[in-house]
Image (tube, helix red, strand yellow):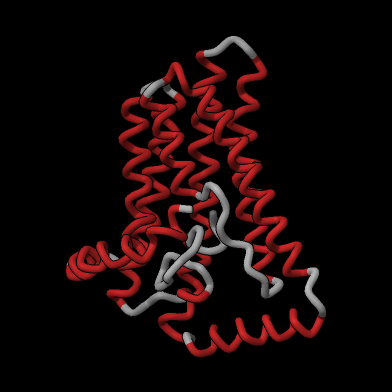
Amino acid sequence: MFDGNFRTQVDAAVKPIGQSIKRLGITADMITGAGIVFAVAAAVAIGAGALNLGLLLLVLTGVPDLVDGAVAKAWGTASQRGAFFDSVSDRLTDGLLFGGVTWYLVSSDGRPWVVLLPVACYVSASLVSYIRAKADALGLDGSGGLVERAERFILLAIGLLFPQLLLVVLGVIVVLNMITAGQRFVKVWRQADAPPKALSDRRRSRARRAARTSGPRSAEQRGSRRGRTHSGGRRPSA
């Protein structure tokens, strides 16, 4: 939802930042790598019970998501490889963060069932991302939905800021993820139900758009945060 409504404005706002970072000699891959490092640190802090520090590191983990695309454009290196790295780092980051929450709950809450909540958050988030990825592979559009990665980050941040609400927040994330997965599934199902000729025409149209934007801007049409107008994660990410 965030990407669909505000991505263009955000990209315009961070464009000057990308130029400034380029002048420092920092590449988009370095920015993405820094996000993974912050995610590891956030997971350790959360797991150790330092939720305020974990919240700060969570915010720092999200910063690369905002600027790596602008840096790639500034360097003129937006590419399928960058989009791939972006997508993989997103899944790894999600796993680390929810893994840190699981660690924290294991050590701080005596009820065994609570550890299932962060696991369910990660599984359901991965389902949302997979639906889009598979739809893209089939030449269909699986983007959009109620919550994407940015919204999940915001909700998790609220849970860390107010630990007494953490379990409630995790439950909300699971429910919203499943609603989003359902929305995307129905969207793709309806497209796939179109007559074969219509599907073929749609795929050819997507291929022509990709061909027109090949080279430095190819990732833009593939939904990557690197050189894209975006709609739901840097890849099929969110």
The residue lying at 58 percent from left, 28 percent from top is 171
Q: Nearer the viewer, residue 205 or 160?
A: 205
Q: Is residue 168 left or right of residue 28?
A: right
Quarter-of-image position of residue 159 = top left
**Quadrant placement of the C terminus:** bottom right
The residue lying at 36 percent from left, 26 percent from top is 161
Residue 128, position as x, y percentages in the image: 63, 51
Q: Is residue 142 left or right of residue 14?
A: right
Q: Is residue 16 left or right of residue 178?
A: left
Quarter-of-image position of residue 119 = top right
- In this view, 192 is above or below 195: above
Q: Disc count in the image?
A: 0
- In this view, 210 is above or below 155: below
Q: Nearer the viewer, residue 184 or 125?
A: 184
The residue lying at 67 percent from left, 57 percent from top is 131
The residue lying at 60 percent from left, 81 percent from top is 206
Q: Nearer the viewer, residue 49 or 219?
A: 219
Residue 185, position as x, y percentages in the image: 71, 56
